[in-house]
Image: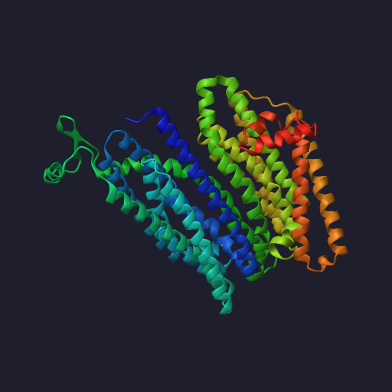
């Protein structure tokens, strides 16, 4: 039997491996949209970003809950010394996931014209059909990931995540270049880009199957000779009954039938799936409202997709911030559970207060920085300044979404699993309503503003519930006054540096190449803003030596440097 310390170390190592893989794959996934726009243009970008949220919703329905259920029940069977039951679970779940994926793929492929009609744009039909093919592979892949996670083997999942994203982006870029060389239409190029998801899912599945084959070759049943194995195979045990080897011989044990296992898996998986639908539904609101609303304002189908593509330019930047929050939020769920069990109410309040304080500040800094540097960043990444106003409004979603994610993780650590999903569903309803009200008047800027308001609502609901559960009463100075001073100082520094860099680069003649100049302005502005953010946070007490001590290697060096400047308390 393993010692607790060994088991804990293995869990920590697994969490680190999965966390690192998630960060790498999410960075690849977020920034693959930039070459997509650069190569394909805003029209292709718009079609892709119209279809992708719908595809993610279908993937969530097909594969969100069952892999979690597989992980849970495989882990239980392994703990009970029943590895064969774990194998039976993955076989049954694979049949279930494969069937669900096949049915949804057929429905999505056949129903593509109807979906295009509901979206209000026929140019999305080829991309919807291309995305449908990924459903043949992705659900099976996620089920196998759940199996290995149940075995506490995180490397297969981590490797498949990175491989899937790498192949997805590589195939997308290759097909983009090939189709553009052949002067293909916008919808054909967008469908080719969507085929990257199909290729990524296929290779990701092959990766998981390779790990499964390798495990099967290496697996041995400890303590049983070949004769005993042959005897087990000849015993002819009926379905619903298995034989378990004990130190005294074979002991018959009643186990669930295949039908009972399927029902058990579905009963556990369906609530998890419903909770996971909240975020895809939030993203899907724009898919079914913005293109149709733009068409109602006189744009044709191509023009509406170009405009929708420009609207989505800020998405990778906001996703980078939320990716950081999502990756770190998983650390707070067990931390809150431990604080609740061991430290009592005061420890819970302290944990929640620190987390909210820092992620509120990080979210505000990201939003303010993107607002101030929106134009040079837009030119740097996309080659022109189209949609800069919409990008500024979309930047505001970084603050609300970051706080919403962290507050949701803290609530889950306290056992409130469903509340964050309901908050997100309420925000999705508000987003749809505000889109209808604002897009006709403000165009894509209205949709971006609606998103900022909706995410702030989700954050407010989650924080209010968290405050009620923990009796947390944050001081107005810590929540509003000090962050406002820090963000104001940071914004002035970033804007001043951007102005100075623009003047210097203009004097050097570099401004003639506006994209190259935008790179210099953006990077210098970001550097100045980040430096002042660090100094102001330390000077106001928002950043303490204790906070820095929690950062490995870099933290102590920063603390030493800030003490020399007499700004760290």
Residue 370 appears at what percent x and percent y? 73, 51
Question: Residue 79 falls in which quadrant of the image?
Answer: top left
Can you give x and y, in whole percent of width and height, for residue 24 in the image? 55, 51
Residue 417 appears anywhere in the view: yes
Residue 195 shown left or right of residue 478 in the figure = left
- Residue visible at 23% across and 37% down? 255
- Display colour scheme: rainbow
Find residue 256 and report its horizontal and vertical position in percent: 25, 38
Q: Residue 253: x, y in percent?
A: 19, 34
* Quarter occupied by residue 563: top right
In which quadrant of the rendered image does the N terminus lie?
Answer: top left
Front residue of 385/288: it is 385
Quarter of the image containing the C terminus?
top right
Query: Residue, x 50% and y 64% (percent of image)?
Result: 196
Q: Residue 106 appears in which quarter of the rendering?
A: bottom left
Q: How many marks?
A: 0
| Lateral position of residue 289 relative to residue 134, left or right | right
């Amino acid at each position: 039997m393993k010692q607790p310390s060994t088991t804990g170390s293995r869990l920590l190592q697994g969490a680190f491996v999965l966390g690192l893989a998630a960060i790498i794959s999410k960075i690849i996934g977020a920034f693959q949209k930039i070459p997509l726009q650069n190569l394909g243009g805003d029209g292709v970008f718009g079609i892709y970003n119209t279809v992708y949220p719908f595809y993610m919703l279908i993937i969530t329905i097909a594969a969100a809950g069952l892999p979690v259920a597989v992980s849970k029940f495989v882990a239980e069977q392994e703990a009970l010394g029943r590895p064969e039951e774990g194998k039976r679970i993955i076989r049954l779940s694979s049949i279930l996931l494969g069937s669900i994926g096949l049915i949804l793929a057929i429905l999505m492929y056949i129903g593509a014209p109807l979906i295009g009609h509901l979206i209000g744009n026929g140019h999305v039909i080829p991309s919807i059909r291309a995305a449908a093919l990924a459903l043949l592979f992705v659900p099976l892949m996620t089920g196998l990931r759940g199996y290995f996670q149940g075995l506490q083997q995180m490397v297969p999942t981590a490797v498949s995540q990175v491989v899937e994203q790498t192949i997805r982006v590589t195939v997308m870029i290759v097909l983009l270049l090939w189709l553009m060389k052949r002067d293909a239409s916008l919808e054909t190029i967008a469908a080719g880009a969507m085929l990257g998801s199909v290729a990524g899912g296929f290779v990701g599945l092959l990766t998981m199957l390779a790990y499964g084959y390798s495990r099967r070759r290496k697996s041995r049943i400890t303590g049983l000779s070949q004769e005993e194995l042959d005897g087990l195979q000849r015993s002819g045990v009926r379905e619903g009954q298995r034989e378990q080897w004990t130190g005294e011989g074979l002991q018959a044990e009643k186990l669930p039938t295949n039908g009972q296992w399927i029902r058990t898996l579905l009963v556990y998986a369906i609530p998890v799936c419903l909770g996971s639908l909240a975020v895809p539904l939030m993203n899907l609101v724009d898919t079914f409202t913005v293109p149709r609303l733009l068409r109602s304002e006189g744009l044709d189908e191509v023009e509406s997709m170009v405009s929708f593509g420009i609207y989505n330019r800020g998405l990778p930047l906001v996703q980078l911030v939320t990716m950081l929050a999502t990756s770190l939020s998983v650390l707070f769920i067990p931390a809150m559970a431990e604080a609740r069990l061991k430290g009592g109410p005061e420890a819970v309040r302290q944990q929640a207060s620190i987390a909210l304080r820092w992620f509120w500040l990080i979210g505000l800094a990201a939003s303010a920085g993107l607002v101030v540097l929106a134009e040079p960043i837009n030119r740097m990444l996309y080659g022109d300044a189209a949609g800069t106003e919409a990008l500024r409004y979309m930047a505001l979603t970084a603050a609300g979404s970051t706080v919403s994610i962290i507050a949701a993780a803290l609530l889950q650590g306290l056992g409130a699993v469903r509340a964050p999903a309901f908050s997100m569903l309420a925000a999705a309803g508000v987003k749809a309503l505000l889109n209808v009200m604002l897009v006709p008047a403000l165009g894509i800027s209205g949709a971006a503003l609606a998103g900022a308001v909706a995410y702030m609502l989700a954050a407010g609901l989650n924080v209010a519930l968290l405050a009620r559960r923990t009796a947390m009463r944050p001081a107005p100075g810590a929540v509003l006054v000090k962050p406002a001073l820090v963000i104001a100082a940071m914004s002035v520094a970033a804007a001043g540096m951007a102005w100075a860099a623009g003047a210097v680069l203009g004097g050097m003649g570099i401004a003639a190449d506006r994209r190259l100049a935008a790179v210099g302005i953006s990077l210098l502005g970001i550097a100045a803003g980040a430096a002042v953010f660090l100094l102001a946070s330390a000077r106001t007490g928002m950043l303490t030596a204790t906070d820095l001590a929690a950062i490995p290697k870099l933290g102590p060096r920063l603390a030493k440097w800030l003490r020399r400047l007499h700004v760290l308390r």
